[in-house]
Amino acid sequence: MSVVGDGTGRGDAGVDEPGWEVDPDDEPGAAVVAAVGRQIKAWREAAGMRAAEFGTAMGYSEDLIYKVEGGRRIPRPEFMDGADGVLGAEGKLAAMKADIAEVRYPKKIRELAKLEAAAVELSAYGSHNIHGLLQTEEYARALFGMRRPAFSQDEVDRLVAARVARQSVFSRSPAPELSFVQEEVTLRRHLGGRMVWRRQLERLLEVSEMRSVEIQVMPTNRDEHAGMGGEMQVLKFKDGSAVGRSEGDFGSRPVSDPKYLRIIELRCGIIRAQALNPRESRAFIEQVLGET
């Protein structure tokens, strides 16, 4: 996944600004960050520099240097580039940016991104907000920003970056088949304000033009609705296996057992049949956009 800033601070006077702390429950991620920290420390000591001197040369606080070396803070790409130059590592520290990128986002999001990256087919129904793969960065930021208890600004940045990175699925070749059904209310709710909402509707229209993508709308006035249990999603893979998740069912956890998958696939199929077809849905989205 592509990476944007992680909040590891650089202030005007080497200030240790709030950053992305390592999740102790994410053992694989914590192990990678710890290994990178040990390498940085080894190079610093080999260069004969104290942590304070290294921090001054880098423009970061001594405390931040200790946190990075101790595996308690995730260094961002420019930190690794700077450390490589200051310590004369000749690209060896900079090369570790790829390792850090793999664990930069929360574990659950990394696991989801890997599934989406491997899927050849995805079917999803969204009842509360626009599906994550369809969200604009502004819309995603608004969603994470209104969460209660509130996320810190750095955590919002981290989650938004992870969500946007997942959208690389649209540029895959060959492209996976992607099918989304959105509840009408998700198109009419002005999350983030009028302009954010308009740009989100425009994004839906843009994505709906892709040959491998189908977007359908479930009108509020339907007498029957197979999705009253909440959001659901099914991912299918090249080897014939699949993973599904249904809000409120099976502990809301991803399932691969065929008997559970059959239930989720059945519901997804009925929902698609009950929703407006893709052409009608596009006209509906254009109508909603026009009403703004």
Image: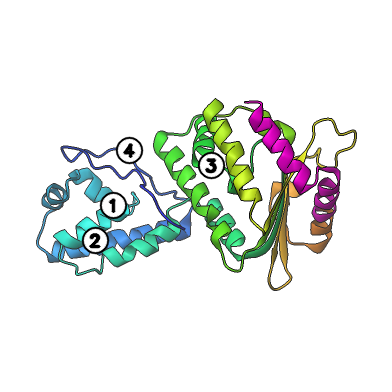
Magenta residues: mostly which secondary structure? helix
The residue shown at (81%, 63%) is: 258
The mark nearer the N terminus, 1 or 2, is: 2
Bounds of the magenta segment: 264-292
Q: Nearer the viewer, residue 56 or 238?
A: 238
Give me the C-alpha separation between circle 3 and circle 1: 32 Å
Q: Looking at numbered disc 3 in the image, what kind of residue is underneath it?
A: Thr
The mark nearer the N terminus, 3 or 1, is: 1
Decide whether residue 290 is among the magenta residues: yes
Q: Quadrant of residue 114?
A: bottom right
Q: Residue furthest bottom?
A: 239
Position of the C terminus by quadrant: top right
Q: Looking at numbered disc 1 in the image, what kind of residue is underneath it?
A: Val
Residue named by callout 3: 136
Q: Is residue 284 above or below residue 26?
A: above
Mark 4 against mark 1, which lies toward the viewer?
4
The mark nearer the N terminus, 2 or 4, is: 4
Give me the C-alpha separation between circle 4 and circle 3: 25 Å
Numbered badge on residue 40: 2
How many marks do you count on the picture?
4
Numbered badge on residue 68: 1
Give me the C-alpha separation between circle 4 and circle 1: 13 Å
Residue named by callout 4: 18
Mark 4 against mark 3, which lies toward the viewer?
3
Left or right: where does residue 154 sit relative to residue 128?
left
Percent position of residue 87, x then y: 15, 62
The mark nearer the N terminus, 2 or 3, is: 2
Query: Secondary structure beneath disc 3?
Result: loop
State if disc 4 and disc 2 touch (CB < 8 Å): no
Percent position of residue 49, x then y: 10, 57
State if disc 2 and disc 1 touch (CB < 8 Å): yes
